Each structure stands twice: as C-alpha cells, then as structure tokens.
Image (tube, rainbow, N blue to C red):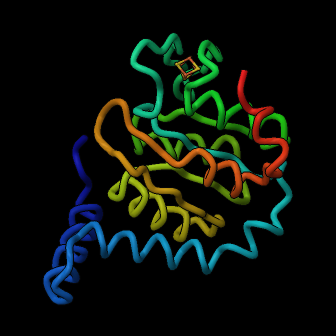
Amino acid sequence: MAESLLEIEVLNRIKAEAKKNGCSEKEVIQAYIQKMNQDNHDEFQRTPIKERIVLVPQCLRESDCKAPLGENGYVCQHCNPECQVNQISKAADRLGYKGVYILPGGSMAQKIIDFSKPHAILGIACEKEALLGGLLLKKLGIIGRGILLFRDGCVNTLVKVADVLKILGVKLDRRQDTKG
Ligand code: SF4
C-alpha cells in the first residue's frame, strides 16, 4: 500500500525515536498504543455499546475464508466456529455493537468511520496500522482502543481473542457463547 507523506513522516519520527532510545520501532509503537489505551480506557467504557464499532484486519480470517469482499470490507459468512473473526464478530453482535468491519486494508477505515459515525472504535491491527489508525482517531476526536496482533503478516495472523472479548465487554462465563 502506498504511504502518504504524512504516514512517511510519522514512521520516520518513530524510527528516530527508536534510535534515540536504543529500542526497536515496534517497541516505540507498542508504548504509544499502550498509552492510548490507558488514556482512553474510561471513556471507551462509558461509551454506549451501540455507539462503538470494531475494526478487524482481513489477515485474521481462515485461509479458506468464504467471505466475499463488499463495499464495506469482507462480509463474514460465519462458516467456521474456530475462526477468530467469527468469534469476535459474533460476540460483538450479541453485545449490540454498532458494527464489525473486516478491512481489506487500513485505508478503508476512514470510509467506514464516515458512514457509521462511531463514538468509539476497538481496532485490531499490526503495529504500523494501529499507529496510523490511532493517529487518525485522535485527529477525528474518536475514542480509540487498539489490540496488537501477536503474530502479524499478510495471512494467518493471530490475536489474543480472550483479550479482545474482555475489552468488548464479554463476561467470563459467556465466552463459550461466542463459538458457533
Ligand atoms: S468465519 Fe467468516 S471470516 Fe472466518 S473464515 Fe468463515 S467467512 Fe471467513
């Protein structure tokens, strides 16, 4: 994906920050996301669930995914109870979230925000997309929380689903209900 000048500038700043502190760029971004999550924790919790959306990266889908690509991202067919996207989207739907969107790329986030007008967003992403997404939400005045993939890449990525469900608001004894 081509990067805008602003994105290049932000990523260059991260590089410089990492060099200055003798750490990796990943660590700088992880610290940024952690701070964003701490700063936004209370306001995210206070935002009614029907005003929140969830953004999920397409790489979390199963390799034999049946979801067609629609106008607002991939449309999950709930074909696999083990699929991370399925578990997250079913839980969010049951809780009453405004929407769950499976993004083919980070650039679609703005479009989803424009039409769904959420007050808060829980986004799952790799470090780079989470950073750019977090900055976009800050600019737009939307409450953002981010969960980083613990295995990133273009396909077969992994997230800690239990952490996602907890932030969504799933109670411990209801977690099993997300399968199926
Ligand atoms: S459950 Fe949804 S996202 Fe997962 S593989 Fe099936 S169609 Fe794709």
User: Where 67 sits versus 45, above or below?
Assistant: above
Report the side of 51 relative to 70 (left or right).
right
List x then y, in percent, for residue 129: 38, 53
List x then y, in percent, for residue 140: 58, 65
- Please tell me which residue is depicted at 33% across the width and 57% down the height of the picture: 128
Quarter of the picture holding the C terminus: top right
Q: Which of the 4 image quadrants contains residue 88?
A: top right
Ligand 1, by image quadrant, is top right
User: Where 117 sits versus 73, above or below?
Assistant: below
- Please tell me which residue is depicted at 25% across the width and 74% down the height of the picture: 14
- Please tell me which residue is depicted at 45% across the width and 67% down the height of the picture: 135
Report the side of 86 relative to 130 (left or right).
right
Residue sitting at the far bottom:
20
User: Where 139 sits versus 87, above or below?
Assistant: below
List x then y, in percent, for residue 67: 53, 15
Q: How many numbered marks are there?
A: 0
User: Where 85 sits versus 123, above or below?
Assistant: above
Quarter of the picture holding the N terminus: top left
115 and 103: which is toward the camera: 103
List x then y, in percent, for residue 100: 66, 37
- Please tell me which residue is depicted at 80% across the width and 32% down the height of the picture: 177
